[in-house]
């Protein structure tokens, strides 16, 4: 390999194990991850510990749900030769760093994270007055800082968590960097990196570098009822729905409300089916949709058929690849265990520095 690995910038992101993913999950995250894996040194993980922050009372089959997500990762084209795929609970350092961060984080920082109050309101049926739920973004900070990524690809809703992560890193560095001399650093396990960074003088060898959020462009993706596609609304199209299921779901979808009769002209810009076309259809199909809808030359049934065709073109190869992996459970187990081994190596290197800096 001629490429200088140390020069490849690092990316990390995670996803909660919600079971099989829907198109919104795919377009909002995974689709971008698949493209990032070629450009960056990527770590992608299943945040199974995070699932417990809201579902501790009934976690369901977390193993099965995590496996479903991993299969969707692989189906979508994450390649274990190109990126590191692992499960959060397979790397105990996430829990350890979370604990150490809990010592230095003021409660007020956590209480003011917008998702804290929002989620408590939205999930009223659950008792989320727990220590773990308040600490959700702090666990996320640990997830992130362990790997010292340059970038964290997330959607808009997660930006406040990356902001908190940066604040925690800053506070940690302020508190413990004075003890983090090159000698201490060299005594910790990540000797090579520290030496390289200091001698090249490229990067200051900061204890925990502050990462940046990489806002993933996420197109507007409506669900079947026209609201945002979301599992809690029950309006989703599955990433690996069969052709039959997909067509059955799209046929009764809401359309431009002004288009009541077949002879009424419509406007794809105010139609959820039009929005799906914008994400999945080719420019040629788009042109046919705009022209045909506005002049009432096509019916909505026909238009929805084209929409289903376009989505299938994207997802059929994913479903195929997914079932190939599903038929090889040993291979998937190997992917996860070697992913976890790589992740542990990276995470343990950071932990060695962290422990040395704190004086543990
Ligand atoms: N909180 C994220 C979400 O709900 C999932 C997540 C957990 C994550 N840890 C992370 C994302 C670390 C990015 C980096 O989508
Ligand atoms: Fe929507 Fe297509 Fe019907 Fe126009 S023709 S209203 S874009 S479904």
Image (spheres, helix red, strand yellow):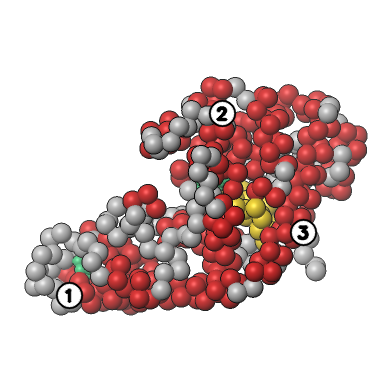
Label 3's element? helix
Res. 144 mark: none
Question: For the point 12% across and 68% down, which residue is it?
Answer: 265
Quadrant of the frame with the C terminus = top right
Q: In this view, does 105 lie above or below 157?
A: above
Q: How far apart are marks 3 and 1 (CA)?
A: 54 Å
Q: Is residue 11 visible from the viewing direction of this image?
A: no
Q: Tell me, yes or no, whether the two marked residues, 3 and 1, touch with CB atoms within 8 Å.
A: no
Is residue 296 toward the left or the right of residue 338 in the image? left
Numbered disc in front, either 1 or 2: 2
Which is closer to the viewer, label 2 or label 3? Answer: 2
**Residue at (20, 72) in percent of width and height:** 300
The residue that mark 2 highlights is 131
| Real-space Cα separation, disc 2 to disc 3, in angstroms | 39 Å
Q: Residue at x 76, y 50 (%)?
A: 344
Residue at 77% x, 41% y is 350
Q: Would the CB of label 2 be found within 8 Å of ligand 1?
A: no
Q: 47 or 176: nearer the eye?
A: 47
Query: What residue is disc 3 on?
Result: 5
Residue bearing the label numbered 1: 299
Image quadrant of ligand 2?
A: bottom left
């Amino acid at each position: 390999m001629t490429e200088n690995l140390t020069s490849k910038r690092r990316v990390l992101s995670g996803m909660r194990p919600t079971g099989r993913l829907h198109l919104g999950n795919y377009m909002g995250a995974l689709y971008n991850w698949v493209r990032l894996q070629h450009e960056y040194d990527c770590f992608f993980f299943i945040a199974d510990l995070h699932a417990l922050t809201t579902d501790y009372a009934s976690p369901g089959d977390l193993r099965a749900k995590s496996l479903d997500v991993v299969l969707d990762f692989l189906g979508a084209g994450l390649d274990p030769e190109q990126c590191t795929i692992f499960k959060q609970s397979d790397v105990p350092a996430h829990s350890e760093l979370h604990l150490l961060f809990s010592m230095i984080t003021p409660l007020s920082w956590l209480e003011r994270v917008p998702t804290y109050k929002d989620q408590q309101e939205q999930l009223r049926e659950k008792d989320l007055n727990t220590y773990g739920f308040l600490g959700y973004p702090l666990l996320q900070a640990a997830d992130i800082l362990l790997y010292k990524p340059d970038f964290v690809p997330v959607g808009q809703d997660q930006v406040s968590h990356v902001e908190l992560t940066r604040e925690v890193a800053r506070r940690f560095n302020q508190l413990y960097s004075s003890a983090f001399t090159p000698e201490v650093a060299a005594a910790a396990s990540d000797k090579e990196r520290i030496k390289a960074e200091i001698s090249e003088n490229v990067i200051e060898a900061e204890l925990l570098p502050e990462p940046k959020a990489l806002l993933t462009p996420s197109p507007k993706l409506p669900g079947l009822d026209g609201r945002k596609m979301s599992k809690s609304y029950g309006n989703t199209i599955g990433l690996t729905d069969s052709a039959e299921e997909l067509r059955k779901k799209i046929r009764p979808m809401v359309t431009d409300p002004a288009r009541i009769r077949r002879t009424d002209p419509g406007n794809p810009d105010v139609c959820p089916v039009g929005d799906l076309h914008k994400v999945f259809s080719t420019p040629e199909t788009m042109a046919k949709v705009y022209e045909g809808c506005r002049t009432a030359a096509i019916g909505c049934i026909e238009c929805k058929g084209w929409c289903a065709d376009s989505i299938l073109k994207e997802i059929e190869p994913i479903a195929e690849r997914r079932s190939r992996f599903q038929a090889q459970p040993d291979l998937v187990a190997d992917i996860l265990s070697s992913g976890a081994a790589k992740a542990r190596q990276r995470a343990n290197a950071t932990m060695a520095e962290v422990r040395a800096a704190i004086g543990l």
